[in-house]
């Protein structure tokens, strides 16, 4: 039975399509669960969550200081304390103590005393945290290209400045709505009162899902569909609530740890909760990625390796799509759209695009989600040149001794193959490929 079970997980689940509707819906879920288990066993999500814990400890006070300054301008800076208390609620009474310490550090940070250099370092520390977060999300989404330096400052600072205001505004609107006369009247009606009470209890959970959805859409340097971000946010929100309850129980029964670690126990619990928070956030991002790219649900996460034959075919397909869009006047292809159309992993498509960009066949637009267009007239790009570029990709990384592979019998065979290819493609260009000539 164990042999049949492993054979089902490793082969049947991936090779066969279920006929009945129940299995047709169940199999994709099982595949994602199996791949997520593989991701967890690989340890990369764990390592990146740990890295973010370290960065958060260094950047938390500067981040709150910047947010505090913005909220103070709106006269709502006192809302930072309830937000921190809500986040650290699973730590119980220790959460209140940590909140008081953090707010004391924030109050002691005087921008006027820091000077221009200190303010610059303050902003740099905050941006480095957001850059580290983006790097972790880009890893999950198989994105190798990071935001440009101007975009980092504009995007990151806009979130840091505007984000706290939006959160406080949402909480204020919720509190105002719950205290309105209409809601108070509904509370007096038995049925409606229960529904309103249930809605009031679910509002924090819905705000968490909304925040996670925003993070999943905004942080990765790639276009994320709202539905995929919402699915990841819903699962991570449920995990967040469940983990918070479990961690609160753990902290409440941790008198032995307090006796062993004494004052360090508070810091230890705080770091564990930070780690769990980042891990849940990255876990949900991974779910969002697999939901948006179901074709990437596979057992091997290792970098996709092209064979020579497949690289030529994939490169020609990619150039055909870009050239056809150019000639038909259709919207430019983005990397994400190419991944969806070609059914290849994102890192494989990114490698192809990088090679074709470096060799001067493609150019990237400067849009927020860049598209790709031809860098040369398709009528002047020969198919022979395209194949030579694809075949010689990454050769510069290997430094061979001159004439190391020269051998006359081999040279004759390769020359005949090259000549036959040149004869077959004589005068053929990218335009001819698209036109079917």
Image: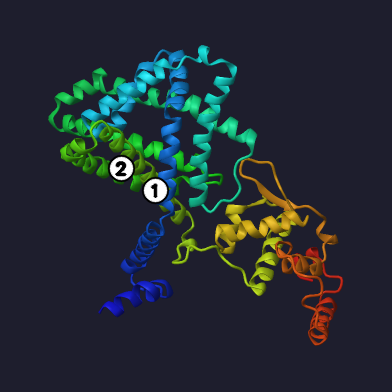
Task: Report the residue marked by disc 2.
Answer: 240
Let me know if residue 317 appears in the view.
yes
- Position above or below: 110 against 369: above
The colour scheme used here is rainbow
Let me know if residue 80 appears in the view.
no
Q: CA distance from mark 2 to mark 1?
A: 10 Å
Task: Report the residue marked by disc 1.
Answer: 284
Where residue 126 sits in the image (x, y, percent)? 50, 30
Residue at x 53%, y 35% (from the top left corner): 128
Is 88 left, or right, of 165 in this rendering?
Answer: left
Is 285 left, or right, of 122 in this rendering?
Answer: left
Residue at x 78%, y 68% (from the top left corner): 388
Q: Quadrant of residue 154?
A: top right
Q: Are marks 2 and 1 in contact (CB under 8 Å)?
A: no
The kind of secondary structure element at disc 2 is: helix
Q: Nearer the viewer, residue 3 or 330?
A: 3
Which of disc 1 and disc 2 is earlier in sequence? 2
Query: Which residue is the extreme one toward the left?
Result: 190
Quarter of the picture containing the C terminus is bottom right
Q: Nearer the viewer, residue 107 or 231?
A: 107
- Position above or below: 325 against 222: below
């Amino acid at each position: 039975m164990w042999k049949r079970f492993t054979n089902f997980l490793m082969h049947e689940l991936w090779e066969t399509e279920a006929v009945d509707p129940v299995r047709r819906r169940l199999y994709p879920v099982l595949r994602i669960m199996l791949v997520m288990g593989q991701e967890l066993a690989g340890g990369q999500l764990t390592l990146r969550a740990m890295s973010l814990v370290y960065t958060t400890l260094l950047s938390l006070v500067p981040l709150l200081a910047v947010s505090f300054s913005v909220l103070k301008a709106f006269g709502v800076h006192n809302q930072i304390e309830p937000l921190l208390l809500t986040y650290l609620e699973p730590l119980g009474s220790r959460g209140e103590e940590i909140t008081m310490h953090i707010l004391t550090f924030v109050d002691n940070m005087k921008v006027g005393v820091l000077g221009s250099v200190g303010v610059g370092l303050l902003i740099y520390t905050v941006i480095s945290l957001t850059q580290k977060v983006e790097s972790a999300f880009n890893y999950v989404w198989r994105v190798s290209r990071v935001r440009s330096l101007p975009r980092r400052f504009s995007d990151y600072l806009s979130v840091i400045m505007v984000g706290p205001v939006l959160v406080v505004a949402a909480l204020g609107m919720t509190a105002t709505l719950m205290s309105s006369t209409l809601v108070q009247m509904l509370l007096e009606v038995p049925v409606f009162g229960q529904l309103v009470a249930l809605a009031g209890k679910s509002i924090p959970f819905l705000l968490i899902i909304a925040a996670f959805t925003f993070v999943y859409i905004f942080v990765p340097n790639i276009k994320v569909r709202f539905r995929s971000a919402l699915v990841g946010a819903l699962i991570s929100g449920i995990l967040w609530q469940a983990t918070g309850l479990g961690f609160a129980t753990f902290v409440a029964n941790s008198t032995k740890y307090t006796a062993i670690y004494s004052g360090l126990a508070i810091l230890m619990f705080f770091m564990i909760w930070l780690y769990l928070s980042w891990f849940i956030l990255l876990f949900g991002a991974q779910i969002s990625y697999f939901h948006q790219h179901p074709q990437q649900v596979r057992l091997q996460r290792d970098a996709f390796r092209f064979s020579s034959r497949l690289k030529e075919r994939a490169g020609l397909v990619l150039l055909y799509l870009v050239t056809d869009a150019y000639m038909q006047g259709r919207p430019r292809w983005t990397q994400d759209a190419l991944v969806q159309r070609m059914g290849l992993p994102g890192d494989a498509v990114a490698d192809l695009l990088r090679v074709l960009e470096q060799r001067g066949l493609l150019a990237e637009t400067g849009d927020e989600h860049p598209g790709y267009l031809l860098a040369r007239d398709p009528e002047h790009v020969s198919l022979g040149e395209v194949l030579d570029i694809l075949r010689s990709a990454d050769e510069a990384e290997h430094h061979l001794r001159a004439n190391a592979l020269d051998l006359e019998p081999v040279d004759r065979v390769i020359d005949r193959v090259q000549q036959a290819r040149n004869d077959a493609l004589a005068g053929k260009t990218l335009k001819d490929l698209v036109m079917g000539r």
